[in-house]
Amino acid sequence: MKKLILFISFFLTNFCFKISAQKIIDSKVLDTLIKHAELTQSDALVIFLDGKLYNEYYFGKEPKKIEAMSSTKSIVNLAIGKLITDGLIKSIDQPVYDFYPEWNQGMKKDVTIRHLLNHTSGMQNIPLTTVEIYPSPDFIKLALAAEIVNKPGTTFSYNNKAVNLLAGIVKIASRKRMDNYLEEKIFKPLGIEDFDWELDDEGNPHAMAGFQVLPKDLAKLGQLFIQKGKWEEKQLISETWFIETGTPNPLEPTCGLLWWIEYEKRFSIVDDEQISKLEQAGLPDTMMSKIRSLKGRYATADFTKLFGEKIIQTTPDWNTKFAPMLRNKGLTVSRKENVNKLGYSTRGYLGNLMVVYPDKNLVVVRMITNESFLKGKGTKDGTGYNNFIDFFELSTKLIQ
């Protein structure tokens, strides 16, 4: 009898453990996610759970390679991580002048690989890529010629030009073009065979964007992040690289090393201290009056909408004049407050998105082409653009 009781106890304990450990997708949240993906003209929605493909949705379209836009930057991160793992780069605190000796002068001598990875290089920056970068025949030479306008490591400014310089560093360190290096060292071990990479006129792969990939294969790269560089029992990239990548940048806690950091709650705050900084930056009184009207603490999603209504819609030259002015000074209209880190994401133009939740072993990818993006009115605010505004909120709730 005693043996029977012990057996039953052992069985129930292990059975209950397996049930509790099993992750279950919330069907209602999944249905809403799929519905919103289709409503916003998505070309693909892919979900990986526990390291395996859970499902993929193409909404009547054929699976195809899609431009990952700025999500490309997060894949460039993997190239740097692999170079460090293999000892071809000493560390991300290695100065750029080790690769480009002409930078061993002025403030350029203080710029490190880390600064390029976390947008704190201080490099002169024109955010609109169509103005300066895309017309350039050589993206790397353009970056090398740029002035350093802020002391490296002191200001955060999202900088496509600085990221493009990483393609040059990868080539010098590996003696291979960046896309070829990634293909050999990362893509092939993951079974990623069908991809393209946009090149400039000199044959340099873009690092700021340009990676064209099957949505399912992008999800594999997200799974590699969750597994901290390990794939089929082989450590492709050092585990410590992913810990470093996911460490918040003190100057912008939503940013790691070319990966964004997702939080349970995000707040945007406009207070007297923030207003004082903006006044000192030289914004005109008419603009400061609009900004003062935003004073308060908001959920970031609410603030984004309010900011659009009160600033962007009433200031035609905000994006071309005032936003670049603040960006080059490392300032934003609001300061951020973040609560409870949940995971990491890649974010690309048009809403080419991937989010990874290591604790849930969950990867969710949404991709969309430019043609699909411009179709119809997919958003609640009726703008006519198909931004998947609740992608992250719904993805977070897939597994409770």
Image (cartoon, helix red, strand yellow):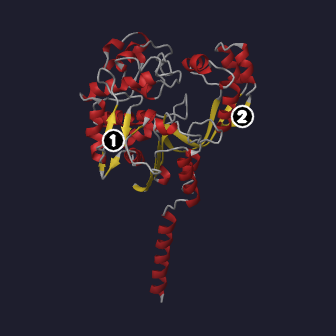
Q: Residue at x 41, y 30 (%)?
A: 209
Q: Is residue 77 left or right of residue 316?
A: left
Name the residue tied to disc 2: 297
Q: Quadrant of residue 116?
A: top left
Q: Secondary structure at mark 2?
A: strand
Report x, y in % for residue 239. Answer: 37, 43
Question: From this viewpoint, which residue is outermost toward the left?
Answer: 175
Q: CA distance from mark 1 to mark 2?
A: 40 Å
- Identify the residue at image location x=49%, y=52%: 359
Q: Is residue 209 above or below residue 342?
A: above
Identify which residue is drawn at 49% across, 40% down: 372
Q: Residues within 10 Å of mark 2 (few under 14, many from 20)?
A: some
- The residue carrying mark 1 is 237
Q: Earlier in the sequence, mark 1 or mark 2?
A: 1
Give above or below for 114 relative to 324: below
The residue drawn where x is 48% and y is 15% is 124
Question: Compared with residue 183, is residue 111 higher up or lower down, i.e. above or below?
Answer: above
In-front residue for pair 339/142: 142
In this rendering, which labeled residue sits more in front, label 1 or label 2?
Answer: 2
Q: Of the numbered discs in the image, which one, if any, rests on residue 197?
A: none
Q: Is residue 349 visible?
A: yes
Q: Amino acid at mark 1?
A: Ile
Residue 14 x/y as whole percent: 46, 72
